[in-house]
Each structure stands twice: as structure tokens, then as C-alpha cells.
Image: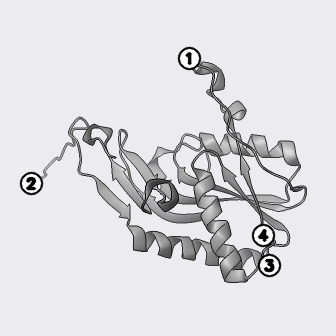
């Protein structure tokens, strides 16, 4: 006998905590040690957080890397991709650009792009376009806290992943940061449940 289970997408699924505060910290540490294993001294490697939410992860990674390695010279910047997005001209209202702060040369450097959630891949495509305005890197790697595996629209894959999640269309991933939201936490939710 075969049972067929059909999920009604209109039915709100329960909110799920993907990373609590303790697991959040452990995940950040693991990502940092993976970076150290591959880049050692970071003399030829720079970190760049993608606006708007990737900057919180890049700041945390930069801070923890500096603590672990004892180095004060790990270069870190933030990148705005507003005018490189493929939906830029489709929007009803003019988007407001965020800050870009890259005060170092990336020519022939290893660039680690940092974003909080990898979803369709379009944000990273835009970031790759935007980064070329600052030079031609030797190579580019991608670090994300959350990888939504089955939602990709472009062939983009992360090199460093905090955790992966299978999420259906209509579900959202919310990354909360202690400095901004009062807690380090990642939640998978459906908008109809009104997450705060």
C-alpha cells in the first residue's frame, strides 16, 4: 500500500530555530578555523561583506579571526551591490544605495565574499560584478552562514557554509544578530506566522 502525502503550502508551518545562540557561536568558530586552514596568515586574503546583512557576518568573522590569529592586519571591507542587481530597473521606486568601504587593493588578492544567506544566487552574481571595479582578484571564495540548497536560480555554490537548510517556497530565513537584534539566532519561518 502506498500513501501519498501532500503538503498544503497555504498551511503555516511551525517556526524552527536553525541555530540557537550557542550553536551560532560554535558555527562562527568553525567557519573561522576553516578559513585559517586554507589561508593561514591572511597576508594575501581579504574579507568583504555584502550589503546589507552580510556585513554583520563579515564583521563577526573578522573580529573572531583577529582574536584567534592575534593579527590586527586582516583586511576587511563592505560592498554595496545595489546598482549591479539584475532587478535594478524593474523596481517601482528608486533603491537607496548602502555604503561601500574598500580602502585596500584587491588586485591579485584572494577575496572572500561574505553573506548571511545564500538563496537564489543573484546577490552573489551582483557582488562578483561589483567587486571587479576594485581590481582583478586572484580568486574569489564565498562564505555564508545559511545555504538554502534547493532555491538556486544561478549556478552559485558556497565554499564555506555554516549550515544548510531545505526550505519550501514561501518560507523565510531570518538571521538575528546580538548587536542589532539582541540575540544571535537563525529562524526558519513562514511570514503568515508574523515572526518578530
Mark 3 or mark 1: whose residue is earlier in sequence: 3
Marks 3 and 1, how far apart at CA: 46 Å
Mark 1 or mark 4: whose residue is earlier in sequence: 4
- Circle 2 sits in a helix, a strand or a loop, which is it? loop
Marks 4 and 3, how far apart at CA: 8 Å
Q: Are marks 1 and 2 in contact (CB under 8 Å)?
A: no
Pick the residue in front: 125 or 102: 102
Q: Are marks 1 and 4 in contact (CB under 8 Å)?
A: no
Q: In front: mark 3 or mark 2?
A: 3
Residue under label 2: 1
Q: Residue 74, which numbered label?
A: 4
Q: How is the image coloured?
A: one colour
Q: Are marks 4 and 2 in contact (CB under 8 Å)?
A: no
- Circle 1 sits in a helix, a strand or a loop, which is it? loop
Q: In front: mark 1 or mark 2?
A: 1
Q: Residue 41, which numbered label?
A: 3
Q: Residue 92, which numbered label?
A: 1
In the figure, 119 relative to 111: above or below?
A: above
Mark 1 or mark 2: whose residue is earlier in sequence: 2
Residue sitting at x 46%, y 69%: 24
Which quadrant holds the N terminus?
bottom left
In the figure, 182 relative to 84: above or below?
A: below
Give coordinates of residue 120: x percent, y percent.
Answer: 54, 42
Residue density around tag 4, few if under 14, some if 14–19, many if 20 or more, within 10 Å: some
Give coordinates of residue 150: x percent, y percent.
Answer: 45, 49
Amino acid at each position: 500500500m502506498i500513501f501519498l502525502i501532500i503538503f498544503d503550502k497555504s498551511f503555516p508551518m511551525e517556526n524552527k530555530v536553525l541555530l540557537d545562540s550557542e550553536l551560532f557561536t560554535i558555527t562562527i568558530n568553525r567557519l573561522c578555523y576553516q578559513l585559517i586552514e586554507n589561508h593561514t596568515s591572511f597576508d594575501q586574503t581579504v574579507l568583504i561583506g555584502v550589503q546589507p546583512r552580510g556585513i554583520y557576518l563579515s564583521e563577526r568573522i573578522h573580529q573572531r579571526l583577529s582574536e584567534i590569529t592575534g593579527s590586527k592586519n586582516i583586511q576587511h571591507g563592505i560592498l554595496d551591490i545595489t546598482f549591479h542587481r539584475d532587478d535594478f530597473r524593474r523596481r517601482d521606486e528608486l533603491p537607496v544605495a548602502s555604503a561601500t568601504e574598500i580602502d585596500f587593493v584587491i588586485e591579485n588578492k584572494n577575496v572572500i565574499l561574505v553573506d548571511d544567506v545564500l538563496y537564489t544566487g543573484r546577490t552573489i552574481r551582483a557582488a562578483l560584478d561589483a567587486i571587479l571595479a576594485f581590481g582583478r582578484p586572484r580568486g574569489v571564495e564565498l562564505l555564508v552562514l545559511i545555504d538554502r540548497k534547493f532555491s538556486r536560480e544561478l549556478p552559485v555554490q558556497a565554499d564555506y557554509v555554516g549550515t544548510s537548510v531545505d526550505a519550501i517556497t514561501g518560507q523565510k530565513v531570518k538571521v538575528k544578530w546580538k548587536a542589532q537584534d539582541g540575540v544571535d539566532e537563525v529562524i526558519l519561518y513562514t511570514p503568515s506566522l508574523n515572526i518578530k
